Amino acid sequence: MRDGQNSVIYRADYQAPAYWIDTVDLCFDLDPAKTRVLNKMKLRRNADVAPQPLRLDGEELNLSRVLVNGQGTSFKIDGGQLVLENLPEGDQPFELEIFTTCAPVKNTKLMGLYVSNDSFFTQCEAEGFRRITYFLDRPDVMASYTVTLRADKARYPVLLSNGNLVDQGKLDDGRHFARWVDPFRKPSYLFALVAGQLVCREQRITSRAGKEHLLQVYVRPGDLDKTEHAMNALMDSVAWDEARFGLSLDLERFMIVATSDFNMGAMENKGLNIFNTKYVLASQATATDTDFSNIESVVGHEYFHNWTGNRVTCRDWFQLSLKEGLTVFRDQEFSQDLAGEASARAVKRIEDVRVLRTAQFPEDAGPMAHPVRPDQYLEINNFYTVTVYEKGAEVVRMMQTLVGREGFARGMTLYFERHDGHAVTCDDFAQAIADANPGSQFEQLLPQFKRWYSQAGTPRVTAVTQYDEPTGEYRLTLSQSCPPTPGQEHKEPFVIPIGLGLLAADGSELTSRMHVLTQASETLTFPGIDGEPVPSILRGFSAPVILEHAYTDAQLLTLLAHDTDPFNRWEAGQRLAVNRALAFMGQQAMPASDIRLDQPYIEAMRSILRHPTLDSAFKELVLTLPAETYLGEQLQEVDPQRVHAVREAMRQQLAQQLQADWQCAFETNSDTGGYVPDPVSCGRRALAGMALTHLCLAARSGAHSAGPGQPDVWPGKAYQRFKDAANMTDRFNALSALVISGNELAAPALQKFHALFKDEPLVLDKWFALQAGQPDRGGNVLPAVKQLMNHPDFNIRNPNRARSVIFSYCSANPGAFHRPDAAGYVFWSERVLELDPINPQVAARLARALDRWKKLVEPLRSAAREAIARVAAKPDLSNDVREVVTRALAD
Ligand code: TRP
Ligand code: ZN
């Protein structure tokens, strides 16, 4: 085990730093094998803290010199830290000079300074800066940085760091240098440098305030034609933050750089965002509509961090949601505002909720459950979670719901007035929102509301209704509870905003309002209701809770057909599907092939599909059955293969029963003209793709049940569309239709696809992922995955590629992964152990694939436990993986 890295960190133990670092002057001599780093800092004691030695964090550094005020000094290394005990007394600032070297080319963890495609990149969040130099590597130490980069000019012509370029020139031996000064103080996790052969797209813009800025997107030569969309997204982001929150770009120059080796999506380094290529590069030939929309969100997200994260940062890493929850909320709002129309906004909202429910709810119910503001961690990298990000965003969204859009904007303004340039806490944020809305209900409820930050677990809200015919009084009782989570047995009631509406039996809306549930149970009374209404509860998904209500099919059909709230309209369709799936799964003895969907459900789906005015995007969402993981969460005990079989059988039924309607949907949506990734055409392509998949599925059955057309022609049509498609969305959807339906044309299509895109890494990722994620047919996927790992294009060291094969199988293909022979689990444990020494962050994400093992049916449960125990037994595990498997095994 590595020194000093084995202990749990507690939020309650926070102490201010014993020293401040005011300025940092870094000089890099960049060399892949041995980069030399000279770090000159000005420090002073923090007068508020008892005098103590200076302890600087460091990791995998070779230390060659330490000078204090220009003089040699004694020091020791303790638990990886550099400890200086004989520092000048008093509060006079002193200079500390540290000279170290590191080996970027050997850095497979992709934290700190590393090499990718012969270029240098850094990733410092959360604790990567200590892999570059000794430092107080904590976010509450904010310093002014000057950075000098020196490197071979031919090999590394572009030299970038945060802030403004103040000097550059030639050096001897074909080398050159560049000096950058960041005008803003920042924590070390926002430091960045990039050096290499890069080209850029540039755009000059003038802000509302009349200031000029230079925007740049740097990529490898050859990728420049794929940067237009990212640049547009960046310009939209700048304009949006000014318009919606009055926050403008504070730098003369704002750069985005793309790299194909990256642990996460992107990083908001001040003025120099570094992105995974996946979230920058897009052309209609290589990127799908989903890619285009993800790029828009992630470019927005990182840009919005410039204020929410960078100008105001986190006091400590327990406050991570202060920047991440808020910034996700902002990027979600940005995408909604760009989508424009109400229905397109609703589609975005449904997509976001789907992520929350399929990924965050299981996290909240599993061994890694933690509050939005965690209380402890072993490895902070493990807490970049859907809870901190997406649930954190829901918490911010509830604040906006409770104080209104304007009240929220006032709160943001006050937040920046108070905390600009500082490192603060989640409490500070909530307080600013409350203080900007004096006398509001939110202000009064603030202490209780903040339980959203401290209590883990997904609250359950149960709704019970009672209608009194003679008096016309309708009563709605809402009760809340929250299950225990690790370390939190008992929960106090939350503040839960609940959007409510009542529909008459004919679907017309009787009333609507927002109710704020604060007690364990409350009863609302609606007088004068003529006939038992249909309740529409939790409209817009107004809180991150599980709503339990015994809706009848008739009520759900009414909501699906008539609710004015598009979210609940979609939700009604999902509930209808969940109820059916649960019923089928209850009938253990029934083979999936005998499953028949009832006519009322089929007719409801048909009327959505045929609806004259609904958007195609919305139709596609309604017709998509709930995900296997979501269905699994509804069960006490899960047999993932049964869940898969039932869901596939339901899909097969929809394919056959709605065949004529799918054909019509395909024909009316298949031509979207010149490629534009706007919500309307994206929705049409999505629905056409879905229709094609169902038509290919119907062809498989050979059941020519409904209406016109020969189903067997569809695989051929799909193949043709695959070949002729003018954009990646249509092409990939056609390919998926063949793969999903298990058609024999899938093999030649996959081969052709590889040949066409062998030089496009991001497209190859899709090719790998599609095969590793395909529906299992008699256990064929695992052997296919093993073969893919032997493919010359596979490289486990590249996170995108590792994810496209290993994660697509272990985390995104439950029907194929949870094999009764446990071979999937053996594969998983081998890959976790193989990845761990290479890249612990990626390994730990993979380790989470078995989080929910306790819910599995036997013999899967025992087999999964064994596989986790095998990983846990390995000596020298990283903190990252050790924390995940230890928590998984705890009871
Ligand atoms: N702060 C980044 C974001 O925008 C997250 C991130 C990027 C990150 N790279 C990382 C976190 C590496 C930990 C490690 O959300
Ligand atoms: Zn972020």
Image (spheres, rainbow, N blue to C red):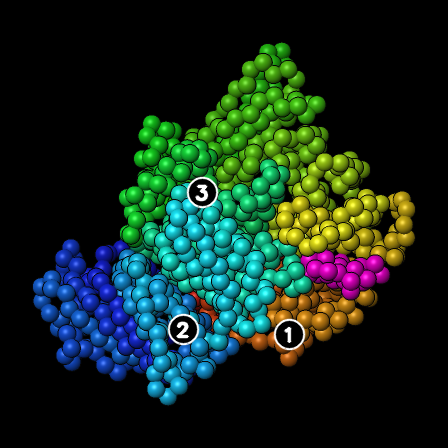
In the rendered structure, the answer to whether residue 387 lies left or right of residue 779 reads: left
Q: Nearer the viewer, residue 69 or 772?
A: 69
Q: Earlier in the sequence, mark 3 or mark 1?
A: 3
Please name the residue that numbered disc 2 is placed on: 159
Q: Which residue is mark 3?
A: 243
Instruction: Classify the position of the N terminus by image quarter.
Output: bottom left
Residue type marked 3: Ala
Q: Are marks 2 and 1 in contact (CB under 8 Å)?
A: no
Q: Residue at x 81, y 66 (%)?
A: 745
Q: Which residue is mark 1?
A: 759
Task: Determine the residue positioned at 90% across, 46% down.
Answer: 708
Q: Secondary structure at mark 2?
A: strand
x 53%, y 42%: residue: 337
Query: Which structural element holds mark 3?
Result: helix
Is 847 on the left or on the right of 133, as rendered? Answer: right
In this picture, which residue range is highlighted in magenta? 715-737
Circles 3 and 2, Cβ within 8 Å, touching? The answer is no
Work out whether residue 638 can be spotted. Answer: no
Q: Earlier in the sequence, mark 2 or mark 1?
A: 2
Q: Amino acid at mark 2?
A: Leu
Q: Is residue 759 visible?
A: yes
Closer to the chain start, of discs 3 and 2, is 2
Q: Does the stretch in magenta take in 724?
A: yes
Nearest the viewer among 342 and 252 is: 252
The kind of secondary structure the magenta stretch mainly shows is helix
The image position of residue 387, as x and y in percent, is 47, 51
As for residue 365 lying within the magenta part, the answer is no
* The residue carrying mark 3 has its beta carbon less than 8 Å from ligand 2: no
- The answer for how far apart the CA atoms under marks 3 and 2 are is 33 Å
The residue at the far top in this view is: 470
Please tell me the numbered disc located at residue 666: none
CA gap, disc 3 and disc 1: 41 Å
